[in-house]
Amino acid sequence: MNETISRLEEVTYDDAIVRKFLLACMVFAGVAFAAGLLAALQLAFFPLNMELPWLTFGRLRPLHTNAAIFAFAGNAIFAGIYHSTQRLLKTRMYSDRLSAIHFWGWQLIIVAAAISLPLGFSQGKEYAELEWPIDIAITLIWVIFAVNFFGTLAIRREKHMYVALWFYIATIVTVAVLHIVNSIEIPWSYMNSYPVWAGVQDALVQWWYGHNAVAFFLTTPFLGLMYYYLPKAANRPVYSYRLSIIHFWGLVFIYIWAGPHHLLYTSLPEWAQTLGMIFSIMLWAPSWGGMINGLLTLRGAWHLLRTDPIIKFMVAALTFYGMATFEGPLLSIKSVSAIGHYTDWIVGHVHAGALGWNGFLSFAMIYYLVPKLWKTKLYSDRLANVHFWLGFLGIVLYYVSMVAAGITQGLMWKAIGPEGQLVYPDFVETVVRIVPLYWARALGGAFFLGGFMVMCYNVYRTIAASTEVSNETVRVRNTRYSSAGEGHRALEGMVTVFSVLSLIAILVGSVIEIYPTLSLHSYIAKTANIDPYSPLEIAGRDIYIREGCYVCHSQQIRPMVSEVLRYGSPSTMEESIYDHPFQWGSKRTGPDLARVGKKYPDLWHFRHMVDPRSVVEKSIMPSYSWLVKDKTDFLSLRKKVSVLRNLGVPYSPEQVAQADRLAEEQAKSVAQAIHDQGGPEGLERREIVALIAYLQALGQKEKQPRPTDQVTVKE
Amino acid sequence: MIVLYLMIPISLALGIGFVGAFVWSVRNGQMDDTETPAHRILED
């Protein structure tokens, strides 16, 4: 600190990269919102699935979530980080080349996702659906981003690191760790793989990742942006810098342990559930500390709320942040989760955060940045206000309809009559009841998309009126080094060295992580009372994952009276021990499938997949008629079963060598059964047979059924 | 639950990393002044 001799130096910020990220953010926001609206309409009106495999809900929903999180929010974060970091550190980004690789690499990843997800390449894990080549690309690009960011920190001219930078640091480090651990997988083709984790282990890793993706991709970076852009937009310092420090450290220490609240009442050991619940409740304090800090920044300047659309968006964003972070811990309390879990309440909760907090904060940032980056004035404040009210109305409609739908359906599922019978034994009754709310939600989404389009027009007119686009040059005080030849200057030529070193670190880390998992099979299997899936069932399971069945059907029965009456005895940890990946699901738009095996004849499943309405009149499920035409890939089964065997699933070498033949034999008998029951002939090579074999195996894999399996519903 | 042998160390490593960052930031004087940083970002 004795070297804080101030010197004036000239810096030219790289604003071109910020403009690029900003425009990419807007393009992909449009894609994400449009995909979301179509998905919402499909739930209200099933014919909109159009019997197109690549557009059906199960494949569209992962496209929507990945586009919203990684394409829209991702590009928004990068735009904000590249813009604010340079100014906070009073230096240009470490390397223009790394910035460019980061930008183009990330957009290529998004394009790869936009092609591969509709084609059905999926790992079957929510928000981590992307297959292994894309996973590797994400890791590489993220490392490049990290090198560029930490390089910029190293050459900074401002000694003090403002709180926003701490939020960015936590984001970069934690997202890297989460992504790598959750994506450890063994490929069985150039675009397919199985995760090394199975069953409860996979569930725990996935929701540790899933929850922290929300925490460190949708919360901490946006809080960093809030701490920079809110004071800038209001032109007044943050209410309490001290509180912001407590806010930051409180969040990062607590968030990482809260993941198991996604698995309450599942077969995850109870102590882990309780741990997740307690840490989730603790999150109330730092989250609200941050929200209050943001809102109180406007003390004495509340008039801006009337006049400045940017402030309006920010205040609404913070309010939605407060709402979502109040509701999150609430939903993590076990007895609340008992009603809310698997329902649309969770969908409403997520969208209060995604549309309200991430969406509105990004819009505020865009309205703030576009005039600055294109050196002009915003085309119309009036249109920005129109956008605000359309968006706000959209979110309120969305949220209210989904919470109402969720609580309604949750209570209907649990309703038990005076004689101890389910009041609504037909699942579809509980669906029909909330379909009007699906329409209301879609209307809310349409308002939100409409508001966004108003913004696009406003931004287009603003940019069109711009006559000068250049990088900003400023004179800044260097408070860190006394002469230009010292310290950070030496680092500037070392981009490649740092990149290579980081890569090596990541690779060494990965090897250390993967090694123990390769010996996993010696710990499981021996005592398990479970048979692994037959090769044909594996083929069917891969179809189940490809079509995204898990986005609407859970495979996890909770230990509650109403669930046992409806679905059978509670799921056990053992039952999914060989499930790579686990398919417990998180949402029941349709009923749970954990024990659907042998519940219906094969022909029922055949007719149900071709036209769900032929067996369940009011069903909203899409038709999967292409499964009758498309042929099962028997040949790849040897490879698949061999990979699973290496991961510890107890297949014999003969089963691996003859996987395709065994599958063909079983397929013949299933096809024969369908024909005998009155269905068409000659289906043995069709995908539908493999899928039916898998569905009929669900809940049927215990070697010795336990007496509790005899639970039946008595009228 | 074998996976805990991996996840707990990783989570702890992250936590310890953050503690390290916190200790560094205190020693480095990042927390000495909790007033002016909020004002300084307002001037570009």
Image (cartoon, helix red, strand yellow):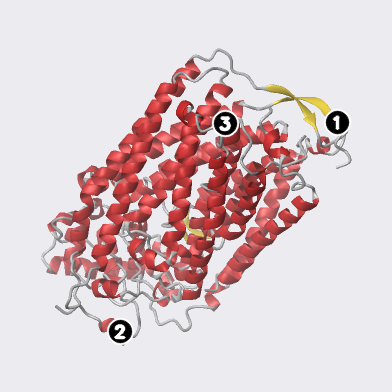
Q: Are marks 3 and 2 on the same chain?
A: yes
List the residue tagged with mark 2: A708
Q: CA distance from mark 3 to mark 1?
A: 35 Å
Report helix, strand or loop for mark 1: loop
Please state which amino acid type lies under the numbered disc 3.
Ala
Q: Quadrant of the image for the N terminus of chain A? A: top right
Question: Along the polypeptide, which appears first: circle 3 or circle 1?
Answer: 3
In the image, residue A144 sits, relative to residue A559, either above or below, namely above
Q: Quadrant of the image for the C terminus of chain A? A: bottom left
Q: CA distance from mark 2 to mark 1?
A: 76 Å
User: Dot 2 falls on which chain?
Assistant: A
The answer to whether residue A183 is visible is no
> Is B10 on the left-hand or right-hand side of A595?
right
Task: Estimate the x, y position of residue A636 in percent, counting from the top left.
Answer: 40, 60
List the residue tagged with mark 1: A484
Please state which amino acid type lies under the numbered disc 2.
Thr
User: Dot 1 falls on which chain?
Assistant: A
